Amino acid sequence: MKKFLIAGNWKMNKLASEALDFCKELAAQNLTNAKDVAVLVPFTDLKETKEGLAGSGIGFGAQNVHFEESGAFTGEVSVPMLKEIGVDYCVVGHSERREYFAETDETVNKKLIALLNAGITPILCVGESLEVREQGGEQTFVAGQILADFAGIPASEAAKIVVAYEPIWAIGTGKTATPEQAEEMCAFIRGVLSGNYDNATGDSILILYGGSMKPSNAKELLEKPDINGGLIGGASLKIDDFTAIANAAAELG
Ligand code: PGA
């Protein structure tokens, strides 16, 4: 049976008080696949998110982390800080961080290793720009990201990383990749991972699609064989939309 993860990426939205209300309401939905659902929230919302979700089985996490354990890095948050709060997940290398905050494959790789060492599941984002796709370079580009981001990580650890394929041209634009485009790239990524490690590792890694996933297109994306779920931005901010996407996965799982 195919495994799923439906993860909401709130980005820079919701005050801590709003997070508490939202998470209580989400917990009250009694999702049948709660353990396959998570919300990824601003640092300031982590405690309230944990409180609101308590006992629901729904996971939670952060959207970024620094790779050093502590030190003179003003404004940063470390893995031990996240660990103490008890996060399950942390997003790494989202395209917005790569674009606006100079995140590189080198820092992404260090963050993945730091999170894995602490037993926190990384959600690694990869994906090409519109310019790269229009030139037909999307596979070369994404394979390059995957190989650089996974550098030096052994198969046993690599299997714990969740990959999210997020074509930049589909993020927040309302322009979703077609299910065929999304499946093609998720299958390609699985092939790259299988080639770099082995088939068992490639098969076990969860590969999500992200970019304008919403209730109206979730089912057709989620039923594709190599798509193990979604990283959902805009539609994760509304209880009804997010619940509908989680339910779509539950029906397929
Ligand atoms: P979107 O964002 O669903 O709003 O397109 C997805 C993401 O950036 O993770």
Image (spheres, rainbow, N blue to C red):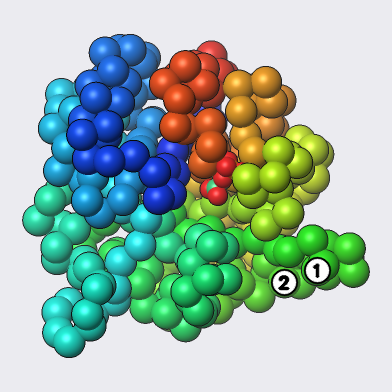
Numbered label attached to residue 170: none
Local crowd size for mark 1, using a 10 Å CA cut-off: few (<14), some (14–19), many (≥20): some
Q: Can residue 201 be seen in this view?
A: no
Q: Could you tell me the amino acid type at mark 2? A: Phe
Say what secondary structure mark 1 lies in: helix
* Residue 113 % position (x, y): 33, 72
Q: In this figure, which residue is indicated by the disc labeled 2?
A: 141
Judge by depth and name the residue closer to the eye, 36 or 30: 30
Judge by depth and name the residue closer to the eye, 139 or 195: 139
Report the image quarter containing ligand 1: top right
Sequence order check: which comes first, mark 2 or mark 1?
A: 1
Numbered label attached to residue 132: 1
> Is 234 positioned to the left or the right of 121 in the image?
right
Marks 2 & 1, CB-CB < 8 Å contact? yes
Above/below status of 72 relative to 148: below
> Is 89 positioned to the left or the right of 142 in the image?
left
The residue that appears at 23% across and 58% down in the rendered structure is 119
Above/below status of 34 relative to 201: above
